[in-house]
Image: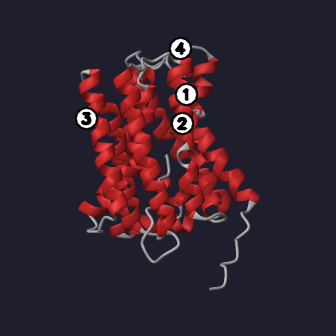
Amino acid sequence: MPERPQQKLDSTGLILAFTAYLLWGAFPFYFKMLSAADPFEIIGHRVTWTFVFCLLGLLVTRQLGGFVEALRTPKLFWGLTGAGLLVTANWSIYVWGVLNNHIVDAALGYFINPLVTVSLAVLVLGERLRRAQVVALSVGALAVIVITIGFGQVPWVALSLAFSFGFYGLAKKQLGAHVSPLVGLTIETALLTPFALGFLVWLQVTGRSHFFSEGPGLTVGLALAGAVTAIPLLLFAGAAQRIPLSVIGLLQYLAPVIQFSIGVLFNHEQMPLPRWIGFSLVWVALVVLTIDSLRAARGPDLVIEPEVMD
């Protein structure tokens, strides 16, 4: 049998993907810088400024027509409405977790997200599990049980992040390639911006806003939330067009590895033995899942696509 010619990896695509996941991994540093503000105030600014940034992006890239067309299409409109609610819930839990010293839990959530994605593919889409996927899911479930028993509480931050992000990915998958990432994120935030902006105005009127009261550093930091959110997504979209999904699937673990390191080394969060055991089990499950996905990529089986950390 003739050997399959090896595809040369696009160096630009690798740089784009690596940079995107590096930025996502560094998110805890950014949100810690905004800790003078309330978590929900941060989310209000993130939604509002992301919409502003994306709208400008649509104008620059001349995608405004696609934005208007998606708004006029009921399936896309309601699908992106649901996706917007899910990603906002995910953002809220994540920011709350970072500001309340649950960075390691947040990292755990994104470690187990691929396992949740496989579960949803089976439960919602009716896909069949391969043997290795069954093993990976079983080990992942055992990891959550070990962490719950050993740490004395359910890792709700991790599970909430994993499932909200998993359902968000499912919603986006159902929409297919009908909208570009930039158009999708613009609509998701556009539908929630009136509520976010109303909340920010209420904070300002009642004297509870920190936007102008904590100095220019916080003001600029909150205003940059749109760029901080959208730029990694655009980098990822560019990478996905240049390099195989199997490579992106390997790089996706870079972000939670960085976040885990930040939580342990910089935020000094507790890592007792049961937690180490639980994380080790998760990593074993991910190794099994990754090897299985790489093998499946050579055959006709469907490969679970990597998630995007909006």
Mark 1 — residue?
261
User: Where is 219 relative to 188, above or below?
Assistant: above
Q: Position of residue 188 (x, y in %)?
A: 42, 52
Mark 4 — residue?
213
Q: Which mark is residue 170?
A: none
Distance from the alpha carbon under mark 1 to that under mark 3? 23 Å
Q: Position of residue 199 (x, y in %)?
A: 37, 31
Q: State the colouring used for the structure image.
A: secondary structure
Mark 2 — residue?
257
For image coordinates 42% across by 73% down, the residue present is: 301
Amino acid type assigned to the residue bearing label 3 in the image: Ile
- 264 or 206, which is in the foreground? 264
Distance from the alpha carbon under mark 3 to that under mark 4? 44 Å
Q: Position of residue 178 (x, y in %)?
A: 46, 71
Amino acid type assigned to the residue bearing label 1 in the image: Ser
The residue most toward the bottom is: 1
Mark 3 — residue?
145
For image coordinates 26% across by 29% down, the residue present is: 148
Neighbours of disc 4 within 10 Å: few (<14), some (14-19), many (20+): some
Amino acid type assigned to the residue bearing label 2 in the image: Val
User: Where is 109 relative to 248, above or below?
Assistant: above
